[in-house]
Image: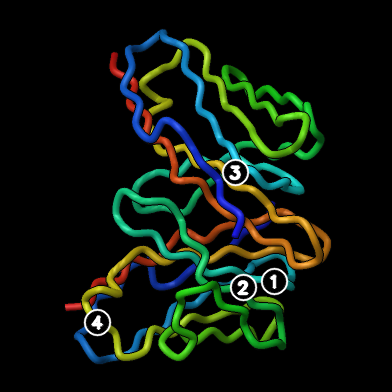
Amino acid sequence: GAVVSQHPSWVICKSGTSVKIECRSLDFQATTMFWYRQFPKQSLMLMATSNEGSKATYEQGVEKDKFLINHASLTLSTLTVTSAHPEDSSFYICSARGQVNYGYTFGSGTRLTVV
Amino acid sequence: TQLLEQSPQFLSIQEGENLTVYCNSSSVFSSLQWYRQEPGEGPVLLVTVVTGGEVKKLKRLTFQFGDARKDSSLHITAAQPGDTGLYLCAGETPGGYNKLIFGAGTRLAVHP
């Protein structure tokens, strides 16, 4: 079955620094990748959609200059949280959808803690 | 903006009881998906329903898609402690740029 690998699974960083999260589709080509944020006891909120080779489309209220998304290849998308602040602490989850398999496969998530 | 209202948000029941979780919207979706998520992990797909009126069964779980493709339900028969977890419904938006919009989730606790 389709597998999406997300790395790192958890990261702690200092306020003001940047953090990069990787999302890889291991056995299929992901034409579209999605990034979600999930706060404790809440559901997944879509942050942005990225198509390979194109600029990401951000949901309303999500700062594109703060959450940089790159989808340079069909198997890799990255989310960079720039100038992180404690309020950015959250669980970030990526999802990938392929050209052949139109299902959505989710990564295992990244727990970001900004101190 | 398409929204999915999921209810109830919390459910605490005894082993052996039945339960139903609802997912409603005023918008039409291409498909409706149900996921289960464990703490600290990504959601895992349980089922996808595509056709209005469709019913799918997965052991003790029954999933239904409304005729108008705006709502869905998840029914669990004879719940077991192993069913404890967060259940999420997600609607796939129609059109060329499909994306998944999640409901608020239902946190289920089944007590022995």
> Mark 2 sits on what residue?
A49
Q: Residue at x 49, y 77 (%)?
A: A22
- Residue drawn at (69%, 71%), measured in percent from left and top? A32
Amino acid identity at mark 1: Thr
**Residue placed under numbered mark 4 in the picture:** A85
- The CA distance from mark 3 to mark 4 is 32 Å
Quote the CA–CA distance across marks 1 and 4.
28 Å
The residue singled out by tag 1 in the image is A32
Residue B24 placement: quadrant: top right
| Number of numbered callouts drawn | 4
- For the residue marked with disc 4, what is the amino acid? His
Residue assigned mark 3: B45
Picture coordinates of residue B20, whole percent (x, y):
51, 21
Work out whether residue A94 or residue B73 is closer to the camera in this orientation and state it: B73
Disc number lying in front (1 or 4): 4
Q: Are marks 4 and 2 on the same chain?
A: yes
Q: Chain of mark 2?
A: A
Q: CA distance from mark 3 to mark 1?
A: 18 Å
Q: Earlier in the sequence, mark 4 or mark 2?
A: 2
Callout 4: helix, strand or loop?
loop
